[in-house]
Amino acid sequence: RTPDVILMDIMLPDCDGYELTRKLQSIDEYKNIPIIFQTAKSASEDLHKGFELGGVDYLRKPIDRLELQARVKSVIKIKKLENELRQKAITDYMTGIYNRRYFFETAKKNLEYAKRTNKNLSIAMLDIDFFKKINDTYGHDAGDFVLKKFTDIILENIRSYDIFARFGGEEFVIQFLDIEKESSLNILNRIKNSLNETVFHFKEYEISFTFSAGLIDFFEENLRTDIDELIKISDKRLYKAKQTGRNKIIYDDN
């Protein structure tokens, strides 16, 4: 478990706290952990350097126990608030999954990693069929209910490290990581079959619905492709699925 806060002495036996802070900042697991410097130094330039490197507070030696507790508690409280704000910024308020902005932010990094390591990934665009009809027939509360149920079923079938986001309205996107297209297709078919076999109960209504999807495999394209191009192709295939009957997954251009 990573720590909530790091107490860092500026003067260390084998290196100084500045050097160790630089090393921690380069490690993803530790770079966002707040650092409180402990120092016997009084020069303002030393403290300024510590803050420039990412320190959030400092304590002068000798350390007062009550002051230490108060500073640590304050730093943890601020960090918790920052994390909550960050979580709100990257999630969709309706479904609780990632939003479009976070998807692009993370999917681009994953694609660059796939290029460097020659690993595959897939992008799927999904759209609930006749969603407007659900809203018009049962009301917008029913539409919200369907969005949440659709989200739940997808989360039950994808892997924890796949990136799943609401793209907008009734449209969703999944980035399947380190996987062949056939395996991605199998996951999507499981979701499709699950929906085909399920009737949802909302108030006095029984609601069933389906979705259409377009799937693109990174290895279909050249290594210079980007996320925007993969999204464009999967969206084109989604459109084809809609135009040719719905409740289907299009995964090639044949």
Image (cartoon, helix red, strand yellow):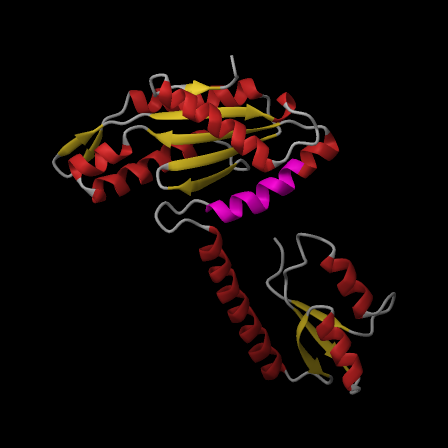
Measured along the vertical axis of the image, is residue 159 above or below residue 94? above
Magenta segment main secondary structure: helix
* Residue 218 shows in this picture: yes
Residue 58 x, y percent position in the rendering = 68, 79
Q: Residue at x 64, y 42 (%)?
A: 109
Q: Nearer the viewer, residue 243 or 126?
A: 243
Asked which quadrant contains residue 37, the reply is bottom right
Q: Residue at x 51, y 32 (%)?
A: 159
Q: Outermost residue toward the top?
A: 254
In the image: residue 193, left or right of residue 29: left
Query: Residue 180 location, x and y as percent?
Result: 59, 21
The residue positioned 47% from the left and 62% from the top of the image is: 85
Residue furthest out toward the bottom: 42
Residue 127: x and y in percent read 38, 31
Q: Choose between 34 and 87: the one closer to the eye.
A: 87
* Residue 143 vertical position relative to residue 36 in the rendered view, above or below: above
Asked whether 10 or 69 is in front, the reply is 10
Can you give x and y, in whole percent of width and height, for residue 141 in the image?
22, 44
Question: From this viewpoint, which residue is outermost toward the right?
Answer: 14
The residue positioned 27% from the left and 24% from the top of the image is: 198
* In this picture, residue 128 sits left or right of residue 39: left
Magenta-drawn stretch contains 128: no
In this rendered view, identify the residue nearer to me: 144 or 76.
Answer: 144
Q: Is the residue 50 above or below the residue 190 in the image?
A: below
Reply above or below: 125 against 74: above
- Can residue 202 be seen here? no
Q: Which residues are magenta?
A: 99-111
120 displayed left or right of 144: right
120 relative position to 204: left or right: right
